[in-house]
Amino acid sequence: RIVSARAIEGYSVSLVFDNGEKRVLDCKDCFFPGSVFNKIAATDDFARVFVDDSGNLAWDIDADVDSNKVWNNRIDCCRDACYLKSVPAS
């Protein structure tokens, strides 16, 4: 599980997993024509990254909408995929 996430420069996310590992996930490749990630392309929107109740990486598309009530307001990334696609933090 991801226990903490923080956006860092260049559309990357600093992650800490429950096994103590610190890793960095580069999300630049998620931004392509037609991608749902384009909805959070503004750096302030991308910076609102958080860990959801399931331990996955997530963003609310509209910060003023409760994603627990409006399910399609959330973008999430599976914690396993985040681990596999990330690299150890230096």
Image (cartoon, rainbow, N blue to C red):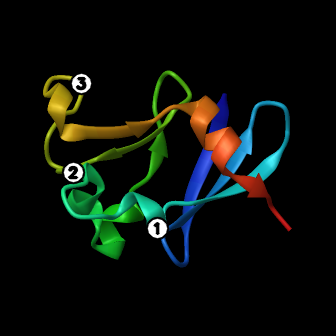
The quarter of the image holding the C terminus is bottom right
Residue type at mark 3 is Asn
How many C-alpha atoms fall within 10 Å of the one at disc 1: few (<14), some, or many (≥20)? few
Q: CA distance from mark 1 to mark 3?
A: 27 Å
Place of residue 35 in the rendered image (x, y in percent of width and height, measured from the top left): 25, 54
Comparing labels 1 and 3, the label whose residue is closer to the camera = 1
| Residues under numbered marks 1 and 2 in contact, where contact means CB atoms less than 8 Å apart | no
Q: Residues within 10 Å of mark 3 (few under 14, many from 20)?
A: few
Pointer 2 residue: 63
x and y, in percent, of residue 14 in the image: 65, 58
In the shown orientation, is residue 49 left or right of residue 40? Answer: right
Residue at 72% x, 45% y: name it: 16
Front-most of 32 and 37?
Answer: 32
Q: Earlier in the sequence, mark 1 or mark 2?
A: 1
State which quadrant residue 29 falls in.
bottom left
- For residue 67, which numbered disc appears in the image? none
Name the residue beneath numbered marker 3: 68
Which three-letter amino acid code belongs to the residue tagged 2? Ala
Q: Secondary structure at mark 2?
A: loop
Q: Residue at x 66, y 36 (%)?
A: 3
Badge 2, how many Cα within 10 Å: few under 14, some, many 20+?
Answer: few
Amino acid carrying label 1: it is: Lys
Which residue does the numbered mark 1 point to in the structure image?
Answer: 28
Measuring from the top left, give residue 68's x and y in whole percent: 24, 24
From the viewer's perspective, is residue 10 above or below residue 24? Answer: below
Q: Nearest the camera: 50 or 25?
A: 25
